[in-house]
Amino acid sequence: MRKCERHSAFHRRAQHERILLLGRRSFLLGTDQRNGRNPLQPFSECYELDPRQPPGPVTLLTSALGKFPTGIAYDGHNIWTTSQIPGAVSIITLNSSGPPTITQVTNGFGFALTGIVYDGANIWVTDQTNSGHKIDKLDSSGAIILSADLGDGPQCPAFDGTNIWVPNNTSHTVNVVRATGGLAGTVIATLTGNGLANPVQAAFDGERILVTNFTGNSVSLWNASDLTPIGTFSIGNGNGPLGVCSDGTNFWIALETANKLARF
């Protein structure tokens, strides 16, 4: 797995506590005798994990997602995932009995959807198209309401209560997009410098935004309220910081190359 899918997981509070995460598998030789899938056709899965139980296998929730899943979010009712080739969102509706209902939407998207975030009212996805890269605001059915142009290679964004912060991996920038009010969908700032080096994911701890820099082996911090840079902090050479989230006190960073989890 690459980019967001290595850390595509979230905690869902509902009738029961669960953690949901994405994965994908490919069968390169022979066929998968369990389901007869094309051996060269990767397929994508969403798993469910009960953190209250002793360590053990995850439970398969569905394997009917789009190819190459990259992001996952929860809007209070449904689970949303993004996928690539072609770009699509899958809307997973959980049922009290029986398997979940999957609705896949591809209309209007480019060749790859990567990041996804919920702003408390709408889902936003980062969208790579042949004519440019953008972020799309979606309605409850997955249709695009509005779009804003981004830098090259938009990845996994974070929402700070007012703005959405989008790391652009290829252009080494961060776009700050207003999510609420009359300026919704407006790029209010394009941040450069501050150690940005192939940034991948943003996270918000209630005051600060942290962005992981994969090739820079570092993280970059800003004050969310006024977009001022705090600084760049090394994670150590060769560690490859990729995914990040916050528990409100600390940032937790997935180090892909080192196969470790770091607390910042």
Image: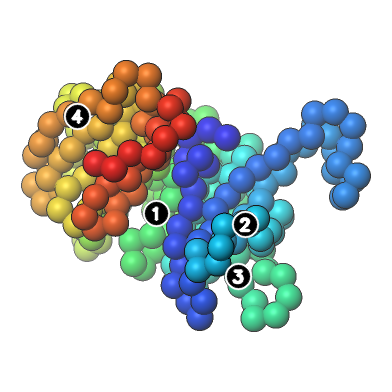
Residue that label 2 marks? 56
| Mark 4 crowdedness (10 Å alpha carbons): few <14, some 14-19, many ≥20 | some
146 and 61: which is toward the camera: 61
Residue topped by disc 1:
117
Q: Are marks 2 and 3 in contact (CB under 8 Å)?
A: no
Amino acid found under the numbered disc labelled 3 = Thr
CA–CA distance between discs 2 and 4?
36 Å
The residue that label 3 is drawn on is 93
Q: Which residue is mark 4?
A: 233
Secondary element under disc 3, as helix, strand or loop, is strand
Residue drawn at the location 12% of the way across and 45% of the way down: 223
Amino acid found under the numbered disc labelled 1: Val
Tell me which label, 4 or 1, sits earlier in the chain: 1
Chain-order first, disc 2 or disc 4:
2
**Pick the front one: 14 or 185:** 14
Q: Badge 1: few (under 14), some or many (20 or more) residues near its Cα, within 10 Å?
A: many
- In three-dimensional space, the C-alpha distance between marks 4 and 1, rounded to whole angstroms, equals 25 Å
**Marks 1 and 3, Cα distance to the nearest angstrom?**
17 Å
- Circle nearer the N terminus (2, 3): 2
Asked if the residue at tag 1 contacts the one at tag 4, i.e. Cβ–Cβ closer than 8 Å, the answer is: no
